[in-house]
Amino acid sequence: GYLQWTLCLTSYLVAVVTVANIIDDYRRKGLAIEAGFSLPPQGYLHSDQLLEWCEKPVVIRCDNGPEFISHEFTQWTQKHEIRIEYIQ
């Protein structure tokens, strides 16, 4: 199989707290979890630090929420030659 990450944002307490999870689907391993009141995409993924720690994925799987269809997110994935697979 190829290396694929899944990104998932979950809001709790009527969107007061958001938790971002980054999961390596191939190895079934959690790579990062971040919680906060406001999580911009660059906070949980756009930092190249995660790519320094982990092998770069071929694909990132996520929903089509505003965080994942933003110009900033798509530019970051293009820069790192990572394909986006939107969940239907």
Image: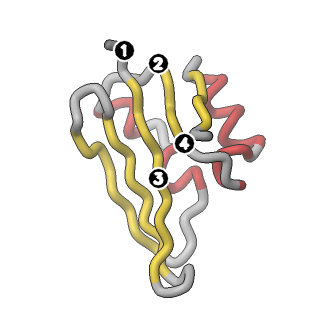
Name which residue lies at 29% across and 33% down: 53
- Position of the N terminus, as image quadrant, is top left
Q: Residues within 10 Å of mark 4 (few under 14, many from 20)?
A: many
Q: How is the image coloured?
A: secondary structure
Residue 44 x %, y %: 47, 52
Residue 58's label in the rendered image is 2
The residue pinned by badge 1 equals 2
> Marks 2 and 3, Cα distance to the nearest angstrom?
17 Å
Q: Is residue 88 left or right of residue 45?
A: right
Name which residue lies at 26% across and 45% down: 30
Residue 3 x %, y %: 36, 21
Q: Reading the chain from its start, which is encountered first: label 3 or label 1?
A: 1
Q: Is residue 78 left or right of residue 53?
A: right
Res. 75 image quadrant: top right
Total labels: the figure holds 4
> Marks 3 and 1, Cα distance to the nearest angstrom?
19 Å
The residue pinned by badge 4 equals 62
Is residue 13 shown above or below 65?
A: below
Is residue 49 shown above or below 52?
A: below
